[in-house]
Image (cartoon, grey):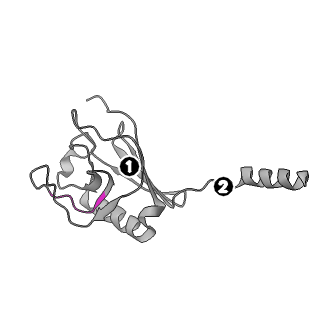
Amino acid sequence: MRALVAAAALLGLNAPAARASVLVAIDKSTQQMSVSVDGAPRYRWVVSTGRAGYGTPSGTYRPQRMERTWFSKEYYNSPMPYSIFFHGGYAIHGSYEIHRLGGPASHGCIRLHPANAATLFALVKQRGMSDTTIVVSGGHRSW
């Protein structure tokens, strides 16, 4: 019996860790997003996170809701295409201010080029919100 318990424990230690099929990792210090699917790198895109006074929260999240077309009720009815909300009003979404990508520019959301936001939105929709993990890390880069 002891051998059976030891073997089961050993097998459990060697089992691969459960992970989401889609991992969206945002590094605020480099203003980059990387997307992996089933552990394989798929995309790397430049983003804009929260500017001074409007930080983007760090942490590990799951998408809460997705909106193909959304307009900010808080900030001048600004368009937020392909929104993936992950923490209250914070979302990953497309931005038409593409010249600002690569540096902190938002009110806390994570902005992407609209084409990249559409790609991410379709991927998360296909694979499912419950199989998607969003990890936001890093600090603000000095400008």
Q: Position of residue 61 (x, y in %)?
A: 41, 50
Give whichever of 111, 55 is nearer the camera.
Answer: 55
Q: Residue at x 22, y 62 (%)?
A: 81
In the drawing, what numbered circle is on residue 33? 1
Q: Residue at x 41, y 55 (%)?
A: 62
Circle 2 is placed at which residue position? 16
Q: Position of residue 55 (x, y in %)?
A: 27, 37
- Relative to 3, is 100 on the left or the right? left
- 18 vs 138: above or below: below
Point out the tag, 1 or 2, that comes first from the N-terminus: 2
Asked whether 115 falls inside the magenta stretch, the response is: no
Q: Quadrant of residue 85?
A: bottom left
Q: Residue at x 84, y 50 (%)?
A: 6
Q: Position of residue 26 (x, y in %)?
A: 39, 46
- Relative to 65, is 126 on the left or the right? right
State the count of labels: 2
The kind of secondary structure element at disc 2 is loop
Tell me where the magenta segment starts and ends, as one range: 79-84
